[in-house]
Image (cartoon, helix red, strand yellow):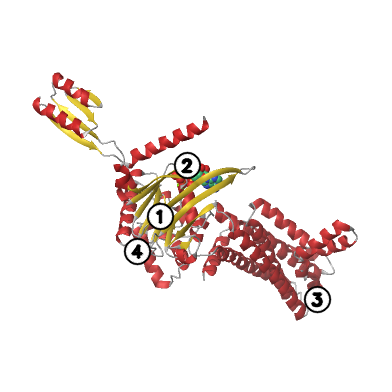
Amino acid sequence: MKIFSIALNTFRENLRDKLLYNLLIFALLMIGSSLILMQLTLGEFHRLILDIGLGSINFFGVLIAIFVGIGLVSKEIEKKTIYTIVSKPVARYQFLLGKYLGLSLTLVINTAIMAAGLLAVLYFQDVPVHAVLFKALGMIVLEFMVITAVALLFSTFSSATLSAIFTLAIYVIGHLTTDLKAFGQKMEGAGRSVLEGMYYILPNLDRFNLKGNVTHQLDVPAGDLLMIAAYGLAYTAFLLMLASVIFQRRDFR
Amino acid sequence: MDEVAKPIVKIQNLRKVFRVGFWGRRVMAVDGVSLEVQRGEVFGFLGPNGAGKTTTIKMLMGLIYPTEGTASLFGRPIGDPSGKAKVGFLPESPYFYDYLTSREFLRFYGHFFGLLGTALDKRIDELLSLVGMTHACDLQLRKFSKGMLQRVGIAQALINDPELVILDEPMSGLDPIGRKEVRDLILRLKESGKTVMFSSHILHDAELLCDRVAMIMKGKLVACGHVSELIAGDTTHEVEMVIDRLLPEALERIKPLAGKVVLQGERVMVVLSSQQAVDQALEVIRSAKAKLVALTPHKASLEDLFIREAKGIQSAVGARVS
Ligand SMILES: Nc1ncnc2c1ncn2[C@@H]1O[C@H](COP(=O)(O)OP(=O)(O)OP(=O)(O)O)[C@@H](O)[C@H]1O
Ligand SMILES: [Mg+2]
């Protein structure tokens, strides 16, 4: 109940964020712009439109997750709005969870709007839509949830700017972890252990990427999907727990 | 019986060291403060700017952690939800979610206490009229003035009908009418059996309202007790007399008694500092057939105590430096 109220209030706060609308408009423009490209490229335009569409949804969603996510907690501390909340019978982890769920709700709705834009484009271009597209969209949302949790974790102990840099770094490296492992295997000693350690600790974000399956119309078995979802949720839960532990010890000054 | 005697707020040897700057320079904000607030009293927490009032209150509310020492609310350690459920808190110069209207804002906070639906709406209406904000109930908080925010902040602190109300500078930013309203509100809370603890540097307000006060300076508690006791310890009991038609010869007899003499044409103003001097001066006035226009006792006030303690601290610090 308390978490739910905080989540709703956070959602309401997000709706007032101009950044959100700007990114949303950009994303829709990007998706729409693939219509123009269609005229130019003769073959493969089905693939291209799906590629650009999903890529835009992913990219702009991640930007929202990072740049709204880093401010979730730090803004409340800066503006001291947190004082009156934490002094009520609200545990700090409840506050954190509420903020997290609020932004997640924003991201889900945001993704739904962007997806509607993509579906409209697909419909007008007579591109067939397969179930795997929706599975891919679901995994994109899951990735947003992991990224949001990363941003939230960093913002519980570092400034907004540093949190943004860290989270961006994790996002980039998170998509390269497979390369990281391959690269590590070519190395010796300490370098190898470090890279392999990073492979296991950092989120393997490429797992959430089903764009290839969509463009090649390869369905993903339910079992695989379940595994990916379990991985994403477990990773998110771990991040949120860590964030709660750090947040619990923090002075609001 | 036992229940009544138990303090509602109990602070024991509380200490807070802030680390500031790149090198982590230590700033002692609160230095070994111990005090208790009893059920049903209005307790004033006084001290100059930067004395450590807000820091102490923030520790009580679980916003920052003490470096040393302990504190409890209702016998529960700070941060315990069952303790917090019975407390209302107004932070210093409050700032709230500015995109909410005061009604939405209070509704949001009511949810934390399980208040819902019409019961909550009724409570909100009561509170808004209590703090005189009914007219602005559907206005977004970002359009509020400082004093209006302060009022909504007070309403927010009372949403759960708390047994203990902790207010950090409740009068700041309020106009004279607002200040009077807050004073009345505090007295009304006391009448209905609540306990109120508030910080302030407006000593006059504290004197009018408080059963007991604590005075904190540079992080240390310098005085704590009933207002009347604290003032009684003060020896300055001055009386001011205004006299008309006093002959020069009579004035000469009064001069040695007075601490200060001011001549204003026909009129003489003298300040006397003991009961004996007052009696003797009255004797002179009567025998010289002069006219006593006014006699005003200068009551010792918290302000005298405050200034004296501040000077004491100042010289102690000076001594340490040299
Ligand atoms: N976040 C902080 N970081 C570092 N030092 C701090 C911090 N907050 C307060 N201090 C220091 O602690 C001391 C006490 O500050 P505090 O805010 O408790 O004073 P106060 O009694 O509430 O003063 P005022 O009447 O001005 O509100 C001051 O010396 C201040 O510089
Ligand atoms: Mg203060």
Mark pair 3, 2: CA separation = 72 Å
Which image quarter: residue A118? bottom right
Residue B100 on image: x %, y % = 48, 60
User: Which residue bears the numbered disc 1?
Assistant: B36
The numbered mark at residue A86 is none
Tell me if the residue at label 2 has its CB under 8 Å from ligand 1.
Answer: yes
Q: Residue at x 18, y 20 (%)?
A: B252
Query: Would you place residue A73 above or below residue B28 in this image?
Result: below
* Mark 1 neighbour density, 10 Å: few (under 14) some (14–19) many (20 or more): some
Q: Nearer the viewer, residue B303 or A81?
A: B303
Q: Amino acid at mark 1?
A: Glu
Q: Amino acid at mark 2?
A: Lys
Mark 2 residue element: loop
Q: Nearer the viewer, residue B197 or B76?
A: B76
Q: Earlier in the sequence, mark 4 or mark 1?
A: 4
Q: Nearer the viewer, mark 3 or mark 2?
A: 2
Subunit bearing disc 2: B
Residue A56 on image: x %, y % = 72, 63
Query: Would you place residue A191 above or below residue B269 in this image?
Result: below
Residue A174 on image: x %, y % = 77, 62
Q: Nearer the viewer, residue A218 or B91?
A: B91
User: Which residue bears the numbered disc 2?
Assistant: B218
Asked if the residue at tag 1 contacts the one at tag 2, i.e. Cβ–Cβ closer than 8 Å, the answer is no
Mark pair 4, 2: CA separation = 33 Å
User: Which residue bears the numbered disc 3?
Assistant: A217
Q: Nearer the viewer, residue A20 or A126?
A: A20
Which image quarter: residue A173? bottom right
Mark pair 4, 3: CA separation = 75 Å
Query: Would you place residue B200 above or below residue A67 in this image?
Result: above
* Mark 3 neighbour density, 10 Å: few (under 14) some (14–19) many (20 or more): some
Q: Residue at x 41, y 63 (%)?
A: B159
User: Which residue bears the numbered disc 4?
Assistant: B4
